[in-house]
Amino acid sequence: AWATMGHKPSDKVLTALERRMLACVDDFKPQALANTVWAWATMRHQPSAKVLAALERRMLVCVDDFEPQHLANMVWAWATMRHE
């Protein structure tokens, strides 16, 4: 919702969200992965390398469950964040 509103939360909030995401990323379903990466890209937030690696690992585990829209959102978000 923040991304859609154009709101950029404080660094303290973003750090807390990243910490929580790392704690539960193994429970993320494809839509949660796609929405998280999309939101960060839309806010122009660059997550830490540790967070990006965790998202990649989780994506590889469940990539066969992604719907076309999830894939499109993920690719757009990675490209927007210039993820390598």
Image (cartoon, rainbow, N blue to C red):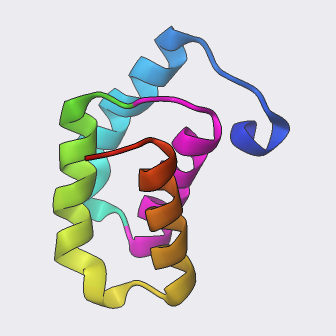
For the stretch drawn in magenta, the main secondary structure is helix
Is 38 in the magenta?
Answer: yes
Residue 4 falls left or right of residue 48: right
Is 35 in the magenta?
Answer: yes
Q: Position of residue 4 (x, y in %)?
A: 78, 45
Q: Nearer the viewer, residue 70 or 1?
A: 70
Reply above or below: 10 against 57.
above
Residue at image coords 40%, 43% = 82
Q: Which residues are magenta?
A: 29-46
Q: Nearer the viewer, residue 57 or 72?
A: 72
Residue at image coords 64%, 20% = 9
Residue 10 falls left or right of residue 25: right
Residue at image coords 55%, 43% = 41
Q: Position of residue 14 (x, y in %)?
A: 49, 23
Residue at image coords 58%, 32% = 44
Farthest residue in the right direction?
Answer: 5
Q: Position of residue 52 (x, y in %)?
A: 27, 43
